Every structure is written in C-alpha cells, then in structure tokens.
Image (spheres, rainbow, N blue to C red):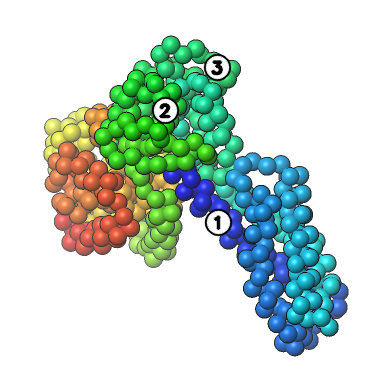
Amino acid sequence: MIASTRRLFRLGMVAVDAVTIVGTYVLADVLRCHLWMQVEWPEKIAGISHSGPIHFWMLSVLPIAWPLLLGWHGWYELRWRSWLWLTVRVGSASAVAVLLMAALALLFQRELYPRAQLGFMAVLMPATTLTARSISGLIGQWWGAQHARHILIIGTDREAVRLRRLLRSIALGRSEVLGHLRLPGDPARSDRTGAVLGDIDKLSELLATRVIDEVVFSVPIDRLAEVLPYVALCEEIGVTAAVPARSAVCHTTPGVADYHGISMLTFGGPRHRPELLFVKRVLDVVVAGVALALLWPWMLLIAAALRLTSEGPALFRQTRCGLNGRVFTMYKFRTMVVGAEERRDAVAHLNEADGPVFKSRRDPRVTRVGAWLRKYSLDELPQLINVLRGDMAVVGPRPPLPAEVAKYDRWQRRRLSMRPGLTCLWQIKGRTHESFEEWMKLDLFYIDHWSLKLDALILGKTVVTVLSGSGA
C-alpha cells in the first residue's frame, strides 16, 4: 500500500509541474510582449498567428520534458529536503531546459528567436516551480496530518530502527510510528528505537485502546513462530499486519507491500487499491457538496421546525468512532428531547436490538418531528458535513459509539477498518430489523467485497428505501 501511495503522489506532482510549466511559458510570453517589447494585446495576438509553429512545439514539448528533467535531478524523491537542495536542483534543471528551448527555437524559428522570452523563462521556471512545490507541500502536509497511518513496530533490532527512520523521513503520505514493542528477551534500547511501549504481550491492550492502522513485525526469521498468535490477533481485529515477505505465516492470502525497499507481506487489513480509495474520496466530496448545495434550504426548514416545536438546539453532536477507532464528532438533527442521553438507562427495557446497540421504535424520548425525520432518515443530513471533513464516507459501515465499541468481540472490531458512512448494506436489507450479529456480518462482507460499483448499488437502493420510509 505504501508503494502504491508513493506512485499516486508522484503522479500528482508530475501533473502539477506539467501545468506549472505551461503557465510559466504563457506568463513569460506576456511579460516579453508587455514589459520588454511593450506590445498591446491585439498586436501580440497578430504576432503569435504569424510566429510559426514555435508556440505549438514549446507548449507540446515542455509539459513532457520539464517533469522528465526534474525527475532526472531527483525532484520526485518523497523525502524531506532542504530548500537549498531544492533550489540547486530546480536551478540546474532550468538551465538545461533553457538550452533545450533555445535549440528548439533555432530549429523552428531562426529569424524570430525569442531571446527575451528565454530570459524570462530562466528566471520564472525556478520561481514558479518552487512556489508550486511549496503549495503542494503544504497541501501534502495537511493531507498527511488528516490521513497519517498509525504504525506500531514489533521488535527493537537494527532493522526495526531502520524501518522507523524510513517511515518518518517520507515527505508525503506520512506514517506516524507510535512506538515499539519488545520481543521476549530483547533489551529496552530506548535510546535507539524511540518509545518502547512495553513487551509484545501488551499488543492486545494497545489494539483495543489506541488508534493503530498497521502492526509491523520486524523480527528475525527464526523467531517468526513466536509472533504467529499476534499476527492472528491483528488479522481477527482487521488491523493490517506486516511481516517479512520471505515467510508466509498465515492462512489468508497475503498482500505484498514495499516499505521503501523492505519487502513485506501484509495480512488482515482490507487490501483496497489506494487509487480507487482516492476516487471514492473524490466522489464522496462531490456527492456531499452537491447534496448540501441542493438541500440547504430544506435543512434550514428542518432546523426551524425543531426549534419551534421543542426546546434545545437543532443540531445534535455526538462522539463516534471512525476509521480504526479514530474519535470524531458526528452531526445529526436532534430527534429527541434535551437530556435524552441521561435518560437512556430508564428506557433500556424498551430496547428492540440485541448486542451492545440500542434501538427502539417506541422510545418516548423521540419528539414528534424527530420521529418523522427518522422515518425518512432526514436526521442524518448534517452528516454530509462529516463527509466533507473526511470523518465519514457516503457509503460505509455506520459509525458506532465508543461505549458500543468497548463491548465488541474481537472479530467485530474489524468493521472499524474502513471509513464509516451514511449508509451501508444493512440500510437496504431491513435496516433496524437485522440482528446485531447479522449487522456486523453485513459490514464485514462490505469491507471484504468493496468496490465503486458496490457503493453505487448501495447508494441507489438506499435512496429507494429512504423514500419509501421503510425500515426506519
């Protein structure tokens, strides 16, 4: 997964540089005409139309040649680099690019050789490319902070130290190393490995109490048998476990991951292609944005109805568990009276669901407007904001309460291995009529068989179910 993410980032950087160099060429041409030659726009347009194929060739070659030159100078290494290093590299690439442009200009247009434009290009290329890199770097830092993968390393040997340093050196798609767990008999070595959180026996506790996306077993091959139960533990919960690729140690089909030169086999976690997950995220933002743009007048009417018919705010905020246990604030329209959470024990006997969840169609805490909103799932509309923020997806397992997660069996925690959503399979298969265990199995089926096509199918059937008001 890490290697695929790196490829995705590199493709994005190449696209940014290709667009930047086209914009730089146009800007240099404008500056040449207006500042150097003091030509007005009508004369400039006439000049371009009689300038031969030079502009066509420049704009055709530069978007391809410029990223190649930058790549040749090490520009796309996804490691943190100093600005001096970046400036030297882009300056060297710019010098080569100017020479190539001069050769191209002489080849196609000897009589109208744009020397002034090449001068502007020599100055502008480093400036615009470094600016684009700075902006994309800020975006990458924000993305990394929002989507950092929390990794726990098992082992304290030299290879574990090397892996930790590699993971922390990546500039984009950051990995946050939470620390190390020792194998039996290993010394602490806190000065070499960073935070040592304890012995490997503590893994079960950490998986239950901390946000962990991957567990990397950096252990010698002769000690792999010792960690098999812990790999199985990760597999059962749904947290990705990575072990040295030279040894197959699990019953399930492993995935292959490249940890910056260290080959690993991965088990347990969902092995979805990063580029497809990226498309899913883009579609989530588009769907949520369009839905909010179309529905905001109706949402204002709902909020007004809630304020006029019952005391309390229109929006209800509640802490929920997201991807791999990440805690976030979920928004809903308030459908109950104020203080309903404190009265939950008083209505516990009305619970119609099994397992750790509470569901009741006879809940006296629900207001009249709230009951109508629930029937058509309109109380969920504010969660479109959660989708835009990245806490949730449009389609995915419903986000549980932390108190419910605390009561999960280990195999049920695997439903947290995918970003929660507004709707999922249980929404179109009877919704609240399903038993808790069936609900969990449907969520795991969705995770194991996820595809964009399945998302579209679920979303379409959810619309039909909601409009009919069934299963609410």
Q: Is residue 43 left or right of residue 391?
A: right
Mark 1 element type: helix
In the image, what residue occupies the spot 31% across and 49% down? Answer: 396
Q: Which mark is residue 12?
A: 1
Q: CA distance from mark 1 to mark 3?
A: 38 Å
Q: Is residue 466 left or right of residue 311?
A: left
Residue labelled with disc 2:
217
Q: Is residue 425 left or right of residue 262?
A: left
Towards the viewer: 170 or 162: 162
Q: Which class describes the residues within 10 Å of circle 1: few (<14), some (14-19), or many (20+)?
A: few
What amino acid is found at the position of numbered circle 1 in the picture? Gly
- Whether pointer 1 and pointer 3 mark residues with C-beta atoms closer than 8 Å, the reply is no
Asked where in the image residue 216 lies, by quadrant, the reply is: top left
In the image, what residue occupies the spot 39% across and 65% down? Answer: 294
Mark 3 element type: helix
Front of the two marks 3 and 2: 2
**65 in relation to 339, above or below:** below
Q: Earlier in the sequence, mark 1 or mark 3?
A: 1
Instruction: Tell me residue 218's x, y (percent).
Output: 45, 27
